[in-house]
Amino acid sequence: MLRQLLFLFLPAAVTAADWPQWRGPQRDGQIANFSAPTDWPDSLQLQWRTPVGRGDASPVVSGGHIFVHTRRDEEEYVSALDLAEGRLLWQDSYGDVPYQWATHHADERGKGPFATPALADGVLYTYGVTQVLSAYEAASGQLLWRHRLNQSLPFGTSASPIIVDGRVIVHIGDGKVGPLTAFDGRSGKTVWTWDADGPSYSSPIIGTWDGTRQLVLLTFQHCIALNPATGELLWQIPFSHPWEENIPTPLRSGDNLILTAMERGTLAVRPTRTDSGWVAETVWHNPNLWMYTNSPVLHGDLLYAFSTQRKGQFFCLDARTGKTLWATEGRQGDYISLLSAAEVLFSLGNDAILSIIEPSATAWKTLAQYQVADSPTWAHPVVLGDRLLIKDATDLSLWTLPTGP
């Protein structure tokens, strides 16, 4: 193991300008602090670019510092960088992560890591491609604890850890069977486990329904909700994927929960407490449009998403009814990361093209497009006010976004 400390900094509380976990502060792809300009320029200004290693995990940000989890050869690296300059602050690495590709499709994507780190209360948590779970003091890079869970999914572990009330929660297993487990964030001790049918590639979310906090996630064959304090099962519904690959992150929409999977369409269920316990009944189901590896975003009552159908197409549903409002022609790409701001949507393809989109219930309207890397961009982008972080195949870069008044 290598640990390199270059600068010491003090931890800061997570603020609205931070990006502490997968898909942002609420794990829903929403940007709270961006004001769009009236006119978009022909190009974006690059502030810095630095090599950090391979992998598709998104960076996380807190207090003006970036944390990124990557791979070099047969070691995984965890690095902290200064947001303003891209300067390395500290770095740790560990070996013995011999991930073996299951198919040629996994070969195309590389050896990860794929799970985005999570940051809370001055502690950074990373979850490696072979389920190595680590906790670091974010300020110094000191390793607090590490669990080598040594499980491997066919395409590598991708579900990003979630932190709830000082506990880091991950799903352990090989895709067929394995426990959902909550660890104490400071000590690494197991708090609770719930035996499930095995992890998927989808990341969990947290929400409150009928006054009860619920940890919601897709497993290998179900959508489940647990009490995050105890691990008690509240409800579950069958939700399997024809290729055994549940990937999109569930999305809260009012009182509904939006789910999607290949060939299953897109649907909304509503968790409700009854006299006999919890149920999650289907509110609407659109069987014609679905997502495979992409997660949707909301803009008001409009649900925007990208499907691998027809070799890639964007579509928009009425989030209240599931009605299809529009769908583009096909051949739009392989993968898209979507973010939603007050006036615009951000769409980053794996081809490194960033598109600025005008939200519309009638059509996909592109306002501007920018090339932001020279290699594939599978990692989710980060937007912090007028700053845009892009992780490509090997590098991390910071761009300046134009903003309005």
Image (cartoon, rainbow, N blue to C red):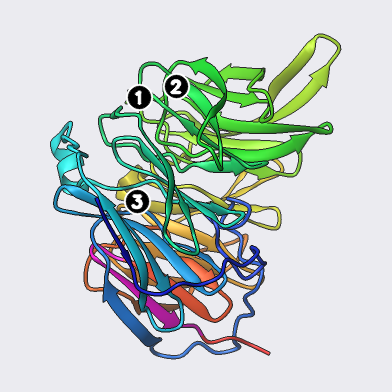
Of badges 3 and 2, the one in the foreground is 2
Mark 3 or 1 closer to N-term?
1
In the picture shown, does residue 273 fall above or below 158?
above
In the rendered image, residue 223, in percent from the top left (x then y), is placed at: 55, 25
Contact between marks 1 and 2 (CB within 8 A): the answer is yes
Q: CA distance from mark 3 to mark 2?
A: 22 Å
Which residue is label 2 attached to?
240
Task: Identify which residue is drawn at 48% across, 33% down.
Answer: 170
Residue 218 placement (x, y as % from top left): 51, 29
- Residue 329 visible somewhere in the drawing: no
Position of residue 293 in the picture relative to residue 191 (left or right)? left
Numbered label attached to residue 312 = 3
Of tags 3 and 1, the one toward the viewer is: 1
Q: CA distance from mark 3 to mark 1?
A: 20 Å
Per the rendering, the mark at residue 100 is: none
Q: Amino acid at mark 1?
A: Glu
Residue at disc 2, secondary structure: loop
Which secondary structure, mark 3?
Answer: loop
Residue 244's disc number = 1
Left or right of residue 123: residue 57: left
**What's the amino acid at mark 3?**
Gly
Name the residue nearer the viewer: 242 or 145.
145
